[in-house]
Amino acid sequence: MSETFLRMTATGPAEHDQPPADRILSGAPQFTTWNIEEADGLYCGTWQATPGKWIIRYDEWEYCRILEGHSIITQHGGEAFELRAGDSFILRPGFSGTWEVVETTTKEYVIRL
């Protein structure tokens, strides 16, 4: 049996979610995720969020590339980063702050636990 080494599309239907209620600071953000890979502590795919603001805390590494929209990530007690189409960034374990979606935002992501 041959193993597939190249995958370019989601492995299943879109998943729908939202931040936990106790982390939402404004709006009613909704998430849609299309997973491409979930194996051995590696997760990647495409994620979309509607406007709102919520608290984020990272225990994992995440690389992101914004495909469309406008978001602001603000580090707890620190700097705010404006994100728009074409921006790429890494969130490291231990990062905490807020994610605010100003305009519906779509990103590609790779998470490593």
Image (cartoon, rainbow, N blue to C red):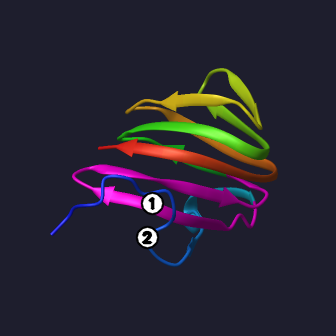
Q: Which residue is mark 2?
A: 11
Label 1 sits on a secondary structure element that is strand
Horizontal side, residue 43 vs residue 80: left or right: left
Residue at the image position 50 percent from the left and 36 percent from the top = 96
Instruction: Judge whether residue 6 is colored magenta.
Output: no
- Which quadrant holds residue 61? top left
Residue 47 place in picture, x, y as percent: 60, 57
Residue at the image position 58 percent from the left and 28 percent from the top = 89
Are dots 1 and 2 in contact, CB under 8 Å?
A: yes
Seen as rendered, the residue at the extreme left is: 1
Q: Which residue is mark 1?
A: 36
> Compared to 26, does 110 lie above or below?
above
Residue 85 place in picture, x, y as percent: 77, 38
Seen as rendered, the residue at the extreme right is: 103
In the rendered image, the quadrant that contains the N terminus is: bottom left
Horizontal side, residue 59 vs residue 98: left or right: left
Query: So how many labels did they put on this image?
Result: 2
Mark 1 to mark 2: distance in Å? 5 Å
Range shown magenta: 27-53
| Foreground of the two, 84 or 71 | 84
Mark carried by residue 87: none
The type of residue carrying mark 1 is Ile
Residue at the image position 43 percent from the left and 70 percent from the top = 11
| Foreground of the two, 33 or 72 | 33
Residue 23 place in picture, x, y as percent: 58, 57
Tag 2 or tag 1, which sits nearer the N-term? Answer: 2
> Compared to 47, does 75 lie above or below?
above
Q: Residues within 10 Å of mark 1 (few under 14, many from 20)?
A: some
The type of residue carrying mark 2 is Thr
Q: Residues within 10 Å of mark 2 (few under 14, many from 20)?
A: few
In the rendered image, the quadrant that contains the C terminus is: top left
